[in-house]
């Protein structure tokens, strides 16, 4: 699962990220609500883990905004003594609450339980464009990020891995402009200083082969010495 952590405290963010990464999830750390909003606009996300340390009204508003996004699971962290905050979070739309100081096993179990429910819900729903998808230009590629699926201009479906979906989300957000390797590696959740760029080259190569089956060839172009660009029209749903 793609998980976004909203936690103002850097030490707590790092601890949460380590716990969920060890469970096999792709984790992004965000320090405040506005950063989470920008992240959700350009990256796939299945579950948001939200720390309830703002005033109640602000936390409730954040949860309500997240709840407006269909198919996004929400886990809220509340202090043991915050009984009213726990109730308010659930009433605002949270799927689960975990008390702080949290037990790593409890947090992992809550996320795994929610992950199963989300996967089951996705499997029961056929892949079909919504109103936004239907309005796309006929020559545009469409990334259905919630299903890790790319639709070519002629309607062919290309099933993606989670990492491929994240990469395409970034390239489509800046369609027509080259995106640097550093920016891509960072968006994928890695430290560029210690990252083997051959991994990125292999990832892009596999993705270009998948998309290269389209009559017009792959829209992913190599910006030599810099990074990669998506050069066709494209939308993210």
Image (cartoon, helix red, strand yellow):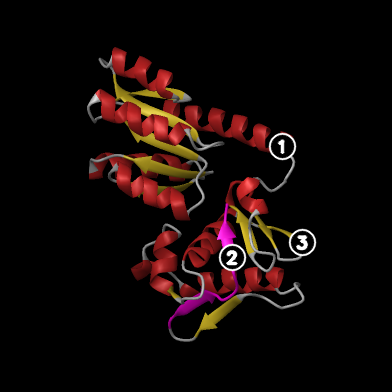
Q: In this picture, which residue range is highlighted in magenta?
A: 226-237
The spot of residue 113 in percent (x, y) is 55, 28
Q: Quadrant of residue 158?
A: bottom right
Instruction: Count the numbered circles shown.
Output: 3
Label 3 element class? loop
The span from disc 2 to disc 3 (Cα, nearest Å) is: 14 Å
In depth, the one of 107 and 219 nearer the eye is 219
Label 1 element class? loop
Q: Quadrant of the N terminus?
A: top right
Q: Are marks 2 and 1 in contact (CB under 8 Å)?
A: no
- Residue bearing the label numbered 1: 125
The spot of residue 184 in percent (x, y) is 44, 67
Labels 2, 1: front one: 2
Label 2 element class? strand
In depth, the one of 22 and 150 nearer the eye is 150
The spot of residue 105 in percent (x, y) is 44, 28
Q: Quadrant of residue 54?
A: top left
Residue at coordinates 36% horizontally, 46% vertically from top-left? 36
- Residue bearing the label numbered 3: 156
Query: For mark 3, does the 10 Å Cα neighbourhood hold few (<14), some (14 to 19), or many (20 or more) residues?
Result: few
The span from disc 2 to disc 1 (Cα, nearest Å) is: 24 Å
In depth, the one of 148 and 12 nearer the eye is 148
Task: Specify which label sits upstream in the sequence, 2 or 3.
Answer: 3
The span from disc 1 to disc 3 (Cα, nearest Å) is: 18 Å
Q: Which mark is residue 234?
A: 2
Compared across the picture, whether 17 is left or right of 25 comes to left
Depicted 138 relative to depicted 11: above or below: below
Residue at coordinates 75% horizontally, 72% vertically from top-left? 214
Whether residue 102 can be seen here? no
Query: For mark 2, does the 10 Å Cα neighbourhood hold few (<14), some (14 to 19), or many (20 or more) residues?
Result: many
Task: Specify which label sits upstream in the sequence, 1 or 3.
Answer: 1
Asked whether 202 falls inside the magenta stretch, the response is no
């Amino acid at each position: 699962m793609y998980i976004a952590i909203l936690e103002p405290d850097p030490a707590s963010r790092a601890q949460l990220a380590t716990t969920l990464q060890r469970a096999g999830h792709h984790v992004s750390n965000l320090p405040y609500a506005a950063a989470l909003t920008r992240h959700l606009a350009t990256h796939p996300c299945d579950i948001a883990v939200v720390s309830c340390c703002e005033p109640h009204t602000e936390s409730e508003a954040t949860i309500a905004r997240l709840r407006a996004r269909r198919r996004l699971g929400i886990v809220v962290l509340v202090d043991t003594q915050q009984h009213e905050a726990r109730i308010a979070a659930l009433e605002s739309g949270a799927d689960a609450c975990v008390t702080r100081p949290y037990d790593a096993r409890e947090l992992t179990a809550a996320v795994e339980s929610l992950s199963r429910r989300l996967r089951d819900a996705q499997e029961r729903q056929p892949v079909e464009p919504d109103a936004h998808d239907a309005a796309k230009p006929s020559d545009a590629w469409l990334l259905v990020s919630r299903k890790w699926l790319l639709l070519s201009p002629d309607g062919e479906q290309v099933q993606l891995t989670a990492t491929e979906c994240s990469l395409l989300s970034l390239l489509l957000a800046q369609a027509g402009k080259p995106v640097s390797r550093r920016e891509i590696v960072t968006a994928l959740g890695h430290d560029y200083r210690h990252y083997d760029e051959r991994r990125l080259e292999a990832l892009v190569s596999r993705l270009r082969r998948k998309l290269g089956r389209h009559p017009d060839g792959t829209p992913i172009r190599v910006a030599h010495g810099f990074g990669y660009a998506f050069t066709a029209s494209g939308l993210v749903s």
